[in-house]
Amino acid sequence: KSRPGDADAGVGRSLASLANAAPIKYRPTGVEGFDRVIGGGLVDGTIVLIGGPRGVGKTTLLVQIAGSFAEKSGEKVIYGSAEESLRDIGHVAQRLGVSNDRVFVLGNESDVLKVVQMCEEERPRLLVWDSVHAGIMEDVDSDVGTATQVDAIANYFSTFVKSMGTIILLVCHVNKRREFAGTAKLQHLVDTIVFF
């Protein structure tokens, strides 16, 4: 979708010329069911919002995607979790038989700026971040998990993907009504929404 700051923003073109433009490059993750749901694979510079109740298997799926994507693409992946330790994530990887030197894991790391700094150093193609409600931006005067923090983090990641071309799988909690927690603004800042 068009984002503020696109080079061709405001420039009128015929639908035929747009339809005949270079096709979007999809990057299959290698997890067939997930690739089918998202239309064939991930796209550079986009954010996929992933939500579902606790215990539904989000971490299991994301660890599998991280390992499979790194194996298939040969590119780096950063898996950041504000809620789980390195040991917890390691146990999931062991259970799944996932092992890849191109996947870097940050456990119990809630500081979004530190995660992005690692991305700037390592230049991953894919960043998995679990979760937007447990992250914090120190310069935002609000508690973890508040609408203000969630919106600030989502805005920051939106700017980041445009500058780096990184793909982000962003986890979001759901409330008791099985809806995404937080503000509607979060859902408008992402490119794809997957709900379990």
Image (spheres, helix red, strand yellow):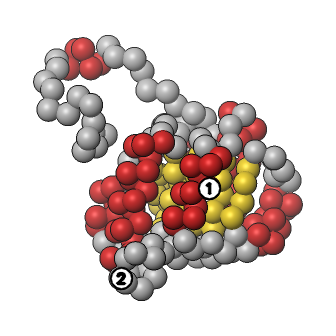
Residue 179 point in image, percent of width and height = 39, 72
Q: Say if residue 31 shows up in the picture.
A: no
Identify the residue at image location x=57%, y=49%: 120
Q: CA distance from mark 1 to mark 2?
A: 24 Å
The answer to which of 174 and 128 lies nearer the viewer is: 128
Q: Which corner quadrant of the image does residue 57 belong to?
A: bottom right
135 lies above or below 72:
below
186 lies above or below 53:
above
Residue 119 point in image, percent of width and height = 59, 51
Q: Tell me which amino acid carries mark 1.
A: Met
The answer to which of 130 and 107 lies nearer the viewer is: 107
The answer to which of 3 and 24 lies nearer the viewer is: 3
130 lies above or below 123:
below
Q: Which corner quadrant of the image does residue 21 belong to?
A: top left
Q: Tell me which amino acid carries mark 2.
A: Asp
The answer to which of 32 and 154 lies nearer the viewer is: 154
Quarter of the figure that contains the N terminus: top left
Identify the residue at image location x=48%, y=69%: 132
Residue 185 point in image, percent of width and height = 28, 64
Res. 118 mark: 1
Res. 141 mark: 2
Q: Say if residue 6 shows up in the picture.
A: yes
Identify the residue at image location x=60%, y=35%: 28
Q: Is residue 75 left or right of residue 20?
A: right
